[in-house]
Amino acid sequence: MHRFTANDIILDRRDFLRRCGMGFGGLALGNLLTGTATSTPLTTSPHFAPKAKRVVHLFMNGGPSQVDTFDRKPLLQDQHGKPIALEGLKTERPTGTVLRTPFEFQRYGQSGLEVSELFKHTAQHADDLCVIRSMTADVPNHEPSLMLMNCGDGRLSRPSMGSWVSYGLGSENENLPSYISMCPGGMPIKRAENWRSSFLPGSYQGTYLDSSIESLDRMIENLKNPSARALRQAKQLSLLQKLNQDHLARHHADPQLEARIRSFELAYRMQTEATDAFDISKEPAKIREMYGEGGFARQCLMARRLLERGVRFVQLWHGNGQPWDSHDDIEDHRNLAQQCDQAIGAFLTDLKQRGLLDETLVIWGGEFGRTPVVELPKAGSNAGKMKGRDHNHYGFTMWMAGGGVKGGHVHGATDEFGFKAVEKPVHVHDLHATVLHLLGMDHEKLTYRYSGRDFRLTDVHGNVVHDIVA
């Protein structure tokens, strides 16, 4: 009869792990194994005094049109249906004449910020918004533009912005991930690459949640362990930790194994914290009503609860495809805005009432904008339609609020048609440099040595846009 030793158990770890059932571990482990290890430290010191402590990225996936939302261009009405010279501006698809906006604009707040009727709830915070009308990216394609906006490089595998922020500032709550990305209905194009940690330690990778699932037990799989009570599970985890640490010591700090250890430790701690953080039924009825109905409203309310509990970086996706990719009919923007405008306005109100907005940097935008000219129909795309807009990376709009930016401020401008940034252009690298600056980090000093060189979010580019810093 064979006598089992500790080594035998360690060598048969898969069966052991399968039988132990560590609750939330499946979710956290899947996110961590794509990177190297080491745990996320608690709050670390930034390079200088920060204006913001945390970030919320409201990602309008697909590319919202700047001229239909936050960049009014009266000339579009006057020149509707007329051709214009693009002057070397190459679009992804064939385009035609000027296309007017079907949406009315109005001035809001003491700043007189012009905002489309699509975002009338968001516009109530006009004096809190810092609108950048001169954003630029590199190409008019979704995949590389998503990677550029999220990871700082459109082609190569790089850590995401949320991972860099977590790496630079650490975590404020050891019982929750420092970086959470919520996308309803599944993963977007490029999937987990949008929130990956790449060559940064695995604990800085974003934790993905399908926020379209309303049942907490289904949205966060294995949150509870039905076969073991808390005390018994704690003993299981303690034994597992001893076995893993022994295995780790004999294998010279294997990064993947260390990531597993950190994953299960976090998973165990999350079983009580996560249940409370994501349960929006605990919110007063008037708060839930303020946010409204729908998946994006649920995301925003969960985000506020996560921020209160010290989550460092929260990304909220609007759609898992490219819902804002209005090639066929720009009127689609109306339905899209109705899905998120009330929630965004309520989110800003809620943060402000709770004293969180000043230390929370809220970012809104997509991966690029859209053309002020109509996209020509073609087979398999918008066949027979002449109401949509193509991708536009030459000039588009994003806005920020809270976190040390100038409220009621407009930075930069596009040309008279809204096609190209012509005044104070802001590249995505400049945006990243500015976000890190507001968090108290020098983007040139926040580096990580990998494969013989020092990497950073902005690579070898980027300048802080000091004009928008309060």
Image (tube, rainbow, N blue to C red):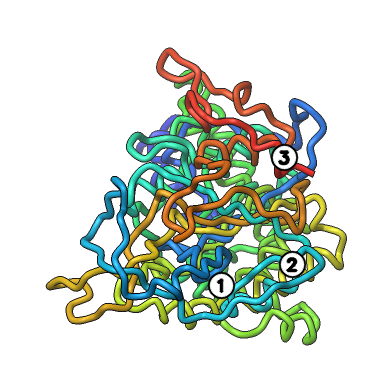
Whether label 2 touches label 3, CB < 8 Å: no
**Residue depicted at x 52% and y 70%:** 74
User: Dot 1 surroundings within 10 Å: few (below 14), some, or many (20 or more)?
Assistant: few
Residue 210 visible? The answer is no
Distance Cα–Cα, label 1 vs label 2: 46 Å
Nearest the viewer among 222 and 307 is 307
* Residue that mark 1 sits on: 217
Q: Please report whichever mark, 3 or 1, sits nearer to the chain's N-terminal start.
A: 1
Image location of residue 237, percent across then percent down: 61, 47
- Please tell me the numbered disc located at residue 112: 2
Q: Please report whichever mark, 2 or 3, sits nearer to the chain's N-terminal start.
A: 2
Does 41 appear above or below 372?
above
The answer to whether residue 468 is left or right of residue 205 is right
Image location of residue 257, percent across then percent down: 47, 33
Distance Cα–Cα, label 3 vs label 1: 36 Å
The answer to whether residue 467 is left or right of residue 137 is right
Whether label 1 touches label 2, CB < 8 Å: no
Nearest the viewer among 185 and 265 is 185
* Residue that mark 3 sits on: 438
**Residue depicted at x 59% and y 66%:** 224
The amino acid type of the residue labelled 2 equals: Gly
Q: Nearer the viewer, mark 2 or mark 3?
A: 2
- Please tell me the numbered disc located at residue 55: none
In which quadrant of the rendered image does the N terminus lie? Answer: top left
Image location of residue 348, percent across then percent down: 74, 67
Residue 150 visible? The answer is yes
In which quadrant of the rendered image does the C terminus lie? Answer: top right
Q: Label 3, secondary structure: give it.
A: helix
Q: Please report whichever mark, 1 or 2, sits nearer to the chain's N-terminal start.
A: 2
Nearest the viewer among 447 and 179 is 447
